[in-house]
Image (spheres, rainbow, N blue to C red):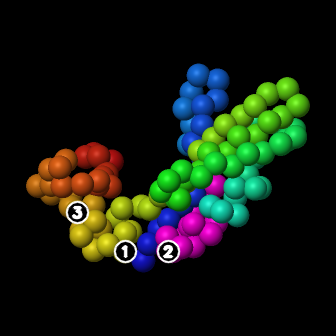
Amino acid sequence: MGNWVVIAEYYYGDEYRTEFICRGQETKDQALKALRAALHTYVPRKNIIEKRRHVYRFADQESYLVVIKGKMTEWECTLRIAELVSDSTDPAVAKRAQLDDGAAEVADGPQDRIPPGC
């Protein structure tokens, strides 16, 4: 079972932010469909009155740059998909992600982890 999300990444003020747009997609294809639907409907949490929207596709076709021109400002964000590694449908990725005995090395790949004492 996969666990895919659609996220928006952007700078707001002087902070880098990540916002979850859509969670719980079971397959990469479902996440890509949700991503493509969000390209023309997603608006940032800050108040912006949209006058024009440009969507740029990155070469990987799994992430896009959205530029929204408002009345007074221009706003940019990257929309992309991501998979929770512990729920990956790739057994090798999921197995490495669930190692919790400290035997896994950083070079083994990404891992979900609960810090000791929590």
Q: Is residue 85 above or below residue 27?
A: above
Question: Element at badge 3?
Answer: helix
**Magenta region includes residue 26:** yes
Q: Which mark is residue 89?
A: 1
| Residue 22 horizontal/vertical position (percent) | 62, 60
Residue at (70% x, 55% y) in the render = 39
Contact (Cβ within 8 Å) of mark 3 with mark 1: no
Crowd around label 2: few <14 · some 14–19 · many ≥20 (10 Å): some
- Whether residue 45 is visible, yes or no, is no
Residue at (32% x, 72% y) in the render = 90
Q: Is residue 82 above or below residue 117?
A: below
| Residue 76 horizontal/vertical position (percent) | 67, 37
Question: Element at badge 2?
Answer: loop
Residue at (88% x, 31% y) in the render = 71
3D distance between C-alphas at marks 2 and 3:
20 Å
3 on left or right of 66: left
> Which region of the structure is painted magenta?
20-34
| Residue 23 horizontal/vertical position (percent) | 58, 62
Q: Which mark is residue 96?
A: 3
Out of 14 and 69, give the one closest to the viewer. 69
Give the residue at the far top of this rendering: 14
Crowd around label 3: few <14 · some 14–19 · many ≥20 (10 Å): some
Q: Earlier in the sequence, mark 3 or mark 1?
A: 1
Q: Amino acid at mark 3?
A: Arg
Question: Element at badge 1?
Answer: loop
Label 2 belongs to which residue? 27
**Magenta region includes residue 114:** no
Q: Amino acid at mark 2?
A: Thr
- Whether residue 38 is visible, yes or no, is yes
Give the residue at the far left of this rendering: 103
